[in-house]
Image (cartoon, rainbow, N blue to C red):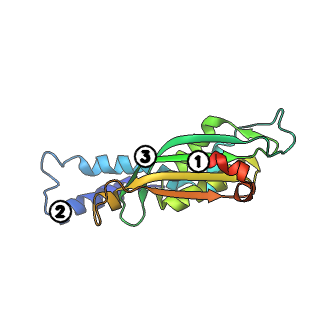
Amino acid sequence: MIDKKAIEEHIRGILIALGDDPDREGLKETPARVAAMYEEVFEGMNYTNHEIAEMFDKCFEEGFEEKTSDRVVVVKDIDLFSYCEHHLALMYDMKASVAYIPNGKVIGLSKIARVCDMAAKRLQLQERIGSDIADIISEITGSEDVAVTIEGCHSCVSARGIKKENAKTFTAEIRGKFRTDPALQMYLR
């Protein structure tokens, strides 16, 4: 579990290391605010992919007894944000799209967005977010035919270092029939 007290102490130390006074009016409550924010934005760090799958395992089976690639479920443009594990920098303006072929059942659509949120609420790499989402969706639905695409901006690229404000990163985790069937790949655009 996230140790808010330790975060407060370390943020106070960072403020001192930056040459500021953590006891001045504008910073007095900053360590507690940052600790509360970290508890919220890193909530996914409290759970394994399996535990997330169990949390959002709300499926419907009626009418989906047979597996066919004629049935595809796609949820596009799911808003996300995360923090990169290399600089603790914000990954923002992220959009995830998740597609799968039902294997006898379908997951509730809102659960797909919740899975995406929880997988992103970790110190992450964009590539791993897609992989984690695909793992979780596959576990919940029992389908190996899963695709996850993510496009987003990284403040470690836009606000520091190379400072390329308009650079976007696109990643794709493509599994099962989505790898080989051109008709299914059209859903990933």
Q: CA distance from mark 2 to mark 3?
A: 24 Å
Give the secondary structure at mark 3: helix
In the picture of the structure, the residue carrying the numbered disc 3 is: 40
Query: Image point 53% across, 41% down: which residue?
Result: 77
Question: Residue 14: image x %, image y %?
Answer: 24, 62
Near-viewer residue (185 or 162): 185
Q: Residue 78: percent from the left, percent from the top? A: 53, 41
C-alpha gap between disc 3 and disc 1 = 32 Å
**52 displayed left or right of 4:** right
Quadrant hosting residue 62: top right
Kind of residue indicated by mark 1: Arg
Q: Report the amino acid beneath label 3.
A: Glu
15 horizontally vs 47: left or right:
left
Residue bearing the label numbered 2: 16
Say whether disc 2 or disc 3 marks the residue closer to the N-terminus: 2
> What crowding class fits label 1: few (fewer than 14 Cα within 10 Å), some (14-19), or many (20 or more)?
few
**Residue that appears at 17% across and 55% down:** 22
Q: Is residue 48 visible?
A: no
Q: Nearer the viewer, residue 111 or 13?
A: 111
What label does residue 189 carry, if any? 1
